[in-house]
Image: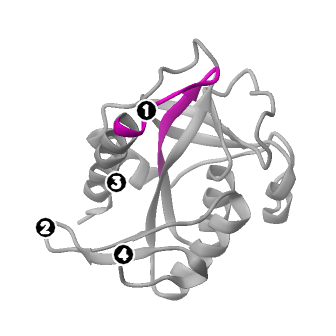
Amino acid sequence: MSNHARGLWGYSGETPAGRPLTIQATGMGGPSAALVLADLAKLGVRRAVRVGTCTAAAGRADLGELLLPSKAIAAGGSASSFGLEAEEAVEPDAQLYDRLRDELDGREAVVASFDTVGSSLPPEATAADMQTVAVFAQAHQLDIAIAAILIVSEVDNERLSDEKLEATAKRAGRTASEGLNLN
C-alpha cells in the first residue's frame, strides 16, 4: 500500500513491462470517485481506467460479463455538478477506448449512472452504475484520457459470487493495465 488518503487504499508499482501503475480505490458513488480523480490529476495522472461493477436487467447483459462503456448517460443527481443535463451522455477517450476494445473480449455497451440504487434503466442502456458518468465528465474537465471496464455483478437481484467477482476483477485489471500501456 502506498497511500491511505481519504480512507481509501491506493497502491503504486510497475506493470510487468516496467511502466508505472497506480491502483486507487475511489469509494462509492460519483462524487467520491470524481474527487479521487481530481487528487490523482494533481499527482500527474494523465490516463485512467475505471474498473468497477454494474447492474443489469435480465436480457441486457449476463452475470459476470465484462462491459466496455462506449458512452455513459447522466441519470440526474450529481451529474449536474459536471454541467450535464439528465439523459446527456459523455464518452470515453477514443484512443484509450480503442486500446481496451482491442484487449478485451467484452462487449461494448451504454451505461447509465445514478446516484441512488434502484432507479429504472433507460431503454438504450445495457447496465447501470453509480460512477462512470462522473468519472468520464471529471476526466474531460481535467484533460485526463479515461475509459471504463465494468463487471456485471448483479442481474435482476441475482449476484455474482465473491469468487467469480474476484476472478473477473483480476481479468479486468490486467486488461486495463495493458490498455494503459500506450506507446
Q: Which numbered disc flags the more N-terminal residue, 1 or 4?
A: 4
Is 58 left, or right, of 108 in this rendering?
Answer: right
Disc ID at residue 101: none
Residue at 62% over, 60% down:
135
Q: Circle 1 sits in a helix, a strand or a loop, which is it?
A: loop
Distance Cα–Cα, label 1 vs label 4: 25 Å
Residue at 47% over, 74% down:
9
Residue 144 image offset from top left, x and y in percent = 52, 70
Report the coloring of the rendering. one colour
Q: Which residues are magenta?
A: 148-163
Q: Nearer the viewer, mark 2 or mark 4?
A: 4
How many residues crowd around disc 1 within 10 Å: few (fewer than 14), some, or many (20 or more)? few
Q: Which numbered disc flags the more N-terminal residue, 2 or 1?
A: 2
The answer to whether mark 4 and mark 3 are in CB contact below 8 A is no
Q: Which numbered disc flags the more N-terminal residue, 4 or 3?
A: 4
Amino acid type for the residue under numbered disc 1: Ser
Question: Principal SS element in the magenta part?
Answer: strand
Disc ID at residue 161: 1
Q: Which numbered disc flags the more N-terminal residue, 2 or 4?
A: 4
Quadrant including the C terminus: bottom left
Q: Circle 2 sits in a helix, a strand or a loop, which is it?
A: loop
How many residues crowd around disc 4 within 10 Å: few (fewer than 14), some, or many (20 or more)? few
Amino acid type for the residue under numbered disc 4: Tyr
Quadrant including the N terminus: bottom left
